[in-house]
Image: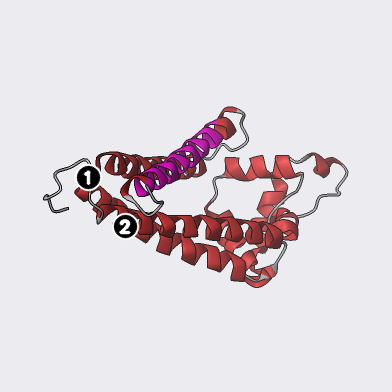
Amino acid sequence: MVCGGFTCSKNALCSLNVVYMLVGLLLIGVAAWGKGFGLVSSIHIIGGVIAVGVFLLLIAIVGLIGAMHHHQVMLFFYMVILFVVFLFQFGVSCSCLAMNRGQQEALLNSTWSILENKTKTDLESQLNCCGLLNTSANQQQFERDVKYCPAACTKNHTCFTCGDMMLHHASEALKILGGVGLFFSFTEILGVWLAVRYRNQKDPRANPSAFL
């Protein structure tokens, strides 16, 4: 059978959803590993990563079952959800690639302000830095963070700010994140296209007179 046929479309869609399942399981495993080894203690960060992994896993399971059984309703919802995810991920990826240093600082400041104290001290210990950014707008917060900073550099007073250390690699990290996100967003639109194509094809094993 040619690659545009029913079997090829089914196999391609199943393979794509198996990849999504593996990525979802990887996200869940990485989050659990990070929590188990104490790399990240914030329940919000762990919960967010696990939620993304579970969501992706559920979408992949729906797509896989729909592809295996040529289930019209499941394939329809799979197409709609995957297209919404594509739009969201495409927008976020483009934002990552277009973000300048001023926007990066604003994002760091807003994120730092909502982090738990335990998460902040964990970051300061791991990065060996104190506080976020020493600016006039956040002077009080910065002085408070430095006062309770547990980093080893405080012993010899040679600490850099965590914001400067993060921003040093932020541009490269955002480019990688945006590029990877953009790549996966196009695999999602590929999944939507495969699902639409496969959904409108007839199963050769079914009744030839049946309309699908």
Q: Is residue 30 left or right of residue 19?
A: right
Pick the residue in front: 26 or 147. 26
- Give the distance between the C-alpha atoms of the residues marked 1 and 2, in whole angstroms: 13 Å
Report which residue position mark 1 lands on: 71
Given the image, on which type of amino acid does mark 2 rest?
A: Arg
Looking at the picture, tell me which residue is in the foreground, 180 or 134: 180
Image spot of residue 187 (x, y percent): 47, 55
Over which residues does the magenta segment extend? Answer: 8-32
Q: What amino acid type should be assigned to the residue bearing mark 1?
A: His
Which residue is at a point 75% across and 59% down the rendered structure image? Answer: 168
| Camera sees residue 96 | yes
Label 2 sits on residue: 197
Q: Tell me which label, 1 or 2, sits earlier in the chain.
A: 1
Q: Along the line of sight, which residue is nearer the eye, 102 or 211? A: 211
Q: Nearer the viewer, residue 26 or 141?
A: 26
Main SS of the magenta part reads helix
Q: Secondary structure at mark 2?
A: helix
